Amino acid sequence: MNKKNDEKRNENMTENTEAVEISPEVKQEEQIADSTVSKTISQSTEDIQGIKEKLSNLENQYIRLMADYQNLQKRASQEKEELYKYAAQKTLEVLLPALDTFDYARASVKPDSKAEKIIEDFTLVFEMLLKCLKDIGLETIEETGIPFNPFHHEPLHQIPTNELPEQTVVQVLKKGYMLNKKVIRPALVSVSIKEEMKG
């Protein structure tokens, strides 16, 4: 009985297999689907290739920009070194006339020269040097009779007096200097304080 059932089942399967035919509409839909999938894959491949090219271009651009940046850094570093190396050149160029004057004064001093001539020559050298320094922005801080300014003065002594207002610069012990209005050395000064009455 089992054998008969098996044979019957096999016959039914064969009939069903023969009965399933693929209709032309299904075939056409499959072809359209295959074509669409192929187009999508082709388009995706093109898109991926385009993205790879853009990425490659951007990488090349990045490498060039980094090289330019590194070259710029090297050039800036070299220029900075050159600037430091020759920073004093302008100052020295301004001081050369004073150096020349000093050299002339030194050469003019003979063993039998009079003291007045030596003083005159060195005064000339000092004035020339001061002029050269003023030309590059140096100013002296040496005025007396003005109010004490902690940014321009450094008090060394206090002088009791009632003749001047308190905290007035009475005496400049060592000149101060400013370069282009910036204090590079404050003046050492004596400052007035109120004199106490003895009684």
Image (cartoon, rainbow, N blue to C red):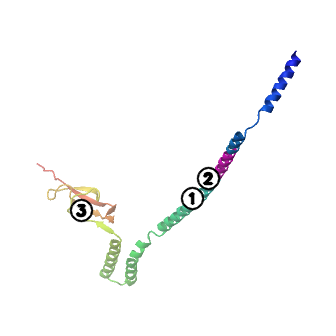
Q: Residues within 10 Å of mark 3 (few under 14, many from 20)?
A: some
Residue occupying the point 58% across, 57% down? 62
Q: Are marks 1 and 2 in contact (CB under 8 Å)?
A: no
Residue occupying the point 41% across, 75% down? 93
* Secondary structure that dominates the magenta span: helix
Q: Disc 1 designates what residue?
A: 66
Q: Which mark is residue 171?
A: 3
The answer to which of 26 and 175 lies nearer the viewer is 26
**What segment carries the magenta color?**
34-48
Q: Are marks 3 and 2 in contact (CB under 8 Å)?
A: no
Q: Is 63 positioned to the left or the right of 80 in the image? A: right
Label 2 residue SS: helix
Nearer the camera: disc 1 or disc 2:
2
Q: How far is mark 3 from mark 1, CA to CA?
A: 61 Å
Q: Is residue 8 above or below residue 196?
A: above
Q: How far is mark 1 from mark 2, CA to CA?
A: 22 Å
Q: Disc 2 designates what residue?
A: 51
Q: Residues within 10 Å of mark 1 (few under 14, many from 20)?
A: few
Residue occupying the point 24% across, 62% down? 171
The answer to which of 38 and 85 lies nearer the viewer is 38
Where's residue 107, x and y in %?
A: 40, 83
Kind of residue sitting beneath label 3: Gln
Residue furthest to the top in view is: 1
Residue occupying the point 84% across, 25% down? 11
Label 3 residue SS: strand
Dot 3 or dot 1: first in sequence order is: 1
Dot 3 or dot 2: first in sequence order is: 2
Kind of residue sitting beneath label 1: Met
